Image: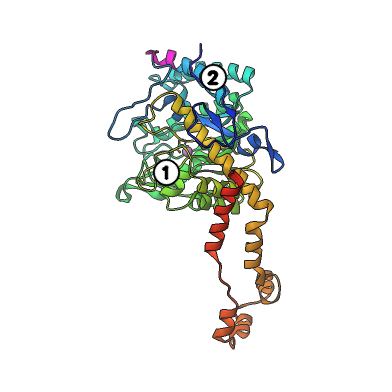
Amino acid sequence: MAYWQVNKIKYIGPHQSLKSDLGFQYYNPEEIIGGKKMKDWLRFSVAYWHTFDQRLVDPFGDGTAIRPYDKYSDPMDQALAKVDAAFEFYDKLGVNYFSFHDRDLAPEGDTLRETNQNLDKIVDKIVEYQKTTGMKVLWNTSNLFNNPRFVAGAATSPYADIFAYSAAQLKHSLEIGKRVGAENYVFWGGREGYESLWNTDMKREQEHAARFFQMAKEYAKEIGFQAQMLLEPKPKEPTTHQYDFDAATTIAFMKEYNLDQDFKLNLEGNHANLAGHSYQHEIRVARTAGLLGSLDANQGDKLIGWDIDEYPSNLYETVAAMYEVVQEGQIGPHGGLNFDAKPRRSSFEPNDLFYGHIVGMDSFAAGLRVALKMKADHVLEDIINERYNSYNSGIGAQIEAGTVNFTDLEKYSLDKTQAQLRAATHSDHLEQIKDTINHYIIETLN
Ligand code: XUL
Ligand code: CO
């Protein structure tokens, strides 16, 4: 039985008008570009929670989603049907990876023992499908935020029983990660933050979080689960302040607690915007620290300002993100682009899940094409090399080599005139750079 009323999505090339059939305009998975297949550059992953579980609720309205497994009223029957629907969806969309939380897959029981039994039954079915389809897991994670017991956090909960339960839940999630061969394991600190400092012992909470990550790493090692561990920064939502605020804050935390050897970052576009940054900024910060792990692909709406998880469609942003990836040579050692994104509440039909992924995949594929072309033409490299040229010789080279001090630099500068100093600077011609980038976008995609 087919759950999704579409044929396999194929590359059809750039198309002018609204398409009657579904197809990719820029994503051509087997095409070799920049020395690699497109699908290997991008490693797209479908997010189980948004794609198969999300009912399209918003704070003012109930879910609108129509899904092909809605007819199953028993939660376990529905969970089993969703696995069939999911694997058919991956096949029709043509992706090789998916990502999931433990709680996305199966309903909770009254005890963790019962919950684990439900989950294991679904994972058994997933593992069988993996054998016949070759589908891989980009990452799995544990939902330590939805249930009311996590009201004040999980690893940073002030209640020790909740910390203990969270550890036990996570332990099983790591075991599942090993069974499905997850390439990464993500920690998004859903409620690891605070509502108010007036009742919060911040230092103690952060030490608890660090201990939690240490134990997770130790247990993964103990069972031979080799996934790359990733922390996913987000500044707010659901708590007023989340400890993993942004890439820079999370890196400082990782270094303070000696986690930077074993953990890297999973960065998300909409989270970057909530922190007052661009996606490109977050990726650059992680790259600079050698800690780029993987990417969650989505975008926010600048006019709304919440974390609304739109499918990415903004070409300028995907070009900027893929520019960073192209400079890096890969997304991360085992990274990919996971669509942490959902359709709008008004796009409630099953096929909208395909349209959403198509625009997301096409947008990043287009970004990749443009970024590779700009790199091949050395557009920005030449500008940047020229801009820092004064450090390649003379006083600049001495500054970089650490062979001069403040006294030397005073001697060097004391009698320089205003005109000489003005002549040492050059216009950045930023407007020209932006016009050039526009030109590359238009030319490459035509
Ligand atoms: C929430 C978010 C999560 C994580 C996984 O904003 O991004 O979906 O990616 O828990
Ligand atoms: Co995310």
Image coordinates of residue 1 in percent, x first then y, are 51, 11
Outermost residue, top direction? Answer: 1
- The span shown in magenta is 71-78
Give the Cα separation between the discs numbered 1 and 2: 29 Å
In the image, 406 versus 371, the foreground residue is 371
* Residue placed under numbered mark 1 in the picture: 300
Left or right, residue 351 beside residue 389: left
In the image, 388 versus 373, the foreground residue is 373
Q: Which mark is residue 129?
A: none
Q: Residues within 10 Å of mark 1 (few under 14, many from 20)?
A: many
Residue at image coords 51%, 39%: 296
Residue 66 vertical placement versus 167 (above, below): above
Residue 434 vertical placement versus 359 (above, below): below
Outermost residue, front direction? Answer: 17
Q: Quadrant of residue 230?
A: top right
Are discs 1 and 2 less than 8 Å apart at CB?
A: no
In the image, 2 versus 83, the foreground residue is 2
- Secondary structure of the residue carrying tag 1 is loop
Outermost residue, bottom direction? Answer: 415
Q: Which mark is residue 88?
A: 2
Q: Quadrant of residue 125?
A: top right
Q: Quadrant of the C terminus?
A: top right
User: How many numbered tags mark residues here?
Assistant: 2
Q: Answer yes or no: disc 1 within 8 Å of ligand 1.
A: no
Q: In the rendered structure, which amino acid carries the disc numbered 1? A: Gly
Q: Do we see residue 415 in this rendering?
A: yes
Outermost residue, left direction? Answer: 60
Give the mark, 1 or 2, whose residue is nearer the N terminus: 2
Image coordinates of residue 377 in percent, x first then y, are 68, 54
Q: Do we see residue 261 in this rendering?
A: no
Q: In the rendered structure, which amino acid carries the disc numbered 2? A: Glu
